[in-house]
Image (cartoon, rainbow, N blue to C red):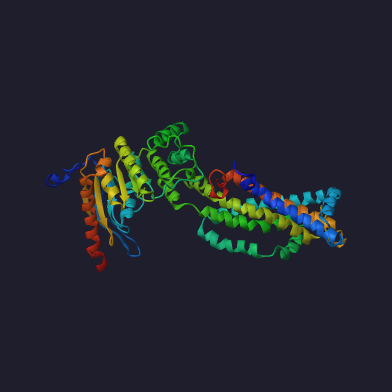
Amino acid sequence: MKPLIASERFVRFAAPALIGVAMIALWQALVTGLDVPKYIVPSPALVARTLVEDWPLLSASLLVTLKITLLAFLCAIVLGTAIAFLLVQSRWIELSLFPYAVLLQVTPIVAIAPLIIIWVRNTTAALTLCATIVALFPIISNTTLGLRSVNPGLVNLFRMNRATRLQMLTRLRIPSALPYFFGGLRISSGLSLIGAVVAEFVAGTGGTGAGLAYQILQSGFQLNIPRLFAALVLITLTGVVLFALMLWLSQLALGGWHESELVPEG
Amino acid sequence: MATDPALTLASAPAAAPAKTGAPAVEVLSAEKIYPNGTRALDPVSLTIHERELVTLLGPSGCGKSTLLNMIAGLLAPSDGRVRWWHHDFAALGAHGKRLAFVFQDATLMPWARVQANVRLPLDLARVPRAESDRRVAAALEPVGLANFGGHYPRELSGGMQMRASIARALVTDPDLLLMDEPFGALDEITRNKLDADLLELWRRKGLTIVFVTHSIYEAVFLSTRVAVMAARPGRVLREVAIEEPYPRGDAFRNSHRFAGYCQTLSELLAQASTSGRGEAR
C-alpha cells in the first residue's frame, strides 16, 4: 500500500484542486484586504452569490449559447468528416480543395461574422454558421491525416487478401483514423464554444434569445461586473465540461488499444 | 507435359538430392530492373518443391526481399517469369492454391484483439462466423496462443505478436508460406525458440516455406536448402542443401556439422563481397 500522497490518482485531482482553492482564497483576501470596489473586481464570494441570484437569467442565456455550441459542433463533425473523406479520395481533389479549407481557417471569424449575420436572416442559423466555420478545420485536417496514416504493411496485407475498397475503408482506414479524429474533436469542441461566443458578441443585442456573450456585453455597459464574472465562469465551465466529455468519449472508443489512452502503470 | 525425352534423362541425376515433392514455385530467369535503371536482381532461376523449406540468405541489398515479393506475386519480374504449380499468378485461386505472407513486422491491427487479427483473412473472404471461429482456434493453438485470443496486440511481447502474425498466415491453410525476415527484430533467445517452433509447425502441417533471413545460423538450422545471395547486383550465388534429418534441435545447433555448414555459407558470402563484381559496374 502506497502512501496516499504518492498515489497518481490522488495527485492528479488533488494538486490542481489545491491550486484552485489557493488562488480563490488569495483573490478573496486581496479584494477584501485592499478594499477593491466590486465594479472593478468583485470577490469570488460575490460572484458565487450573483451566480445563484441571477441564475434564472444566466441559465436561460447558458442554454442559448449551449444550443449554438452543440449545433455548430455537430455540423462541424458531420461536414468536417465528410470533407475529409472527400479529400482522401484522390490527390486531385485534395490539391484543389485543401487551400480553401486553409482559407476558411485563417479568415478571422470576427471579420466575416457581420456579413453572415446580415445574409442569414435566422439568428440561430447565422450564429451556428459562424461557430461551425471556426470549429471545422481541426476536424478536416485531423481526419484527413488519420485516413492517410494507415500502416503500409496492413495495406499490403489487405491487398494480398483481395480486400474490396469498402472493406479497406471500414476495416482499415476508419479504425486507423479514429485516434486522429478524436484529437480533432477535442480541439473543435472548445473552438465551437469560442465561435459561438464570438458570433454572439458580433451579433450584439439583436434577437430575443440572448446568449452568455450578450449578458457579458450588457453587464459591461451597466457596470454590473459581478454578473459579467458570473457569465464568464459559466462559459469557462461549459468549455471544461465539453473537453472532459470528449476525453471520456475518446477513452471509451480507444481505451483498449491506443497509446494515448493508456493509464501509466505502477 | 511433352518434354524432350533426352532432356529429361539428362537432368535426372541432378534431381537426386532430397527433393521432397512436385515443384510448387518455379522462378525462370526472373530479373528485376527498376525504371530508374537500378538492377535489383540479376536473372534468377530457382525451383521450390512442395514440403521444402528454402531460405534466401544474403546481406541487405542482395535482392532477397525482391525475389520473395516476386514469388509472392506482389512484384512482377522485369524479364523472365515465375510459375506456381505450372500456373500463372492470376490462375492460382481458380486452382485452389493459396499463398500467405508473414512480414518483417507482426503488422497486426492495434485496435483488434488477437482473435480478430487472425480472423481477418477469413473475414475478408466472407467465411461464415461459425467456421471462422473454429479455424481461428485451430490456428492459435499450434503457435501457442490458444489462451491469448482475447488480448490486444500491445499486451503481447514481440515474439508473441510474431506468433499471432504466423497464426494469421496459417488460418487460410496456405499451400505456400512466404516469410520475410519474420524474426529479425527479436532477441536471439526468442528467435531460436520461434525457429524451433516453426520447424515443428512446418513438419506437422506439411507446409512449403520460403524464408528470407540474413542470419547464417537461422538459415542452416531451418532449411532443407539455402539459396545464398550476393549484392550489387542482387543475384543467387549458389544453392546449398542442408542434409540434416529432422527433427532438428539443440543437438544439431551445437554439432560440428552445423558449424561446418555455417562456415561454408559464410565463406560463400565473404567471397561474394570481395569478388568486386559490384564495384566494377
Q: Look at 68% across and 51% down and name the residue there.
A: A15
**Residue in view at x 51 percent, y 57 percent:** A90
Question: Residue B36's spot in the image, x, y percent?
Answer: 35, 65
The quarter of the picture where residue A252 lies is top right
Residue A68 or residue A227, whichever sits in front: A227
User: Residue B266 occupies which quadrant of the picture?
Assistant: bottom left
- The image position of residue B177, as x and y in percent, is 33, 43
- Quadrant of the rendering where the N terminus of chain B is positioned: top left
Residue A138 location in percent, x, y?
Answer: 62, 57
Observer able to see residue B210: yes
Q: Quadrant of the C terminus of chain B?
A: bottom left
The correct choice, above or below, for A141 with respect to B247 in the image is: below
Question: Can residue A68 be seen by looking at this rendering?
Answer: no
- In the image, residue A36 sits, relative to residue B244, either above or below, namely below
Of residue A30 and residue B142, the one placed in the foreground of this image is A30
Question: What is the count of numbered marks?
Answer: 0
Residue shown at the point (80%, 54%) measured from the top left: A231
Residue A71 in picture, x, y percent from top left: 71, 50
Q: Is residue A19 left or right of residue B218?
A: right
Left or right of residue A250, residue B249 in this image: left
Residue in the foreground of this view, choosing between B253 and B39: B253
Residue farthest to the bottom, as pictured: B280
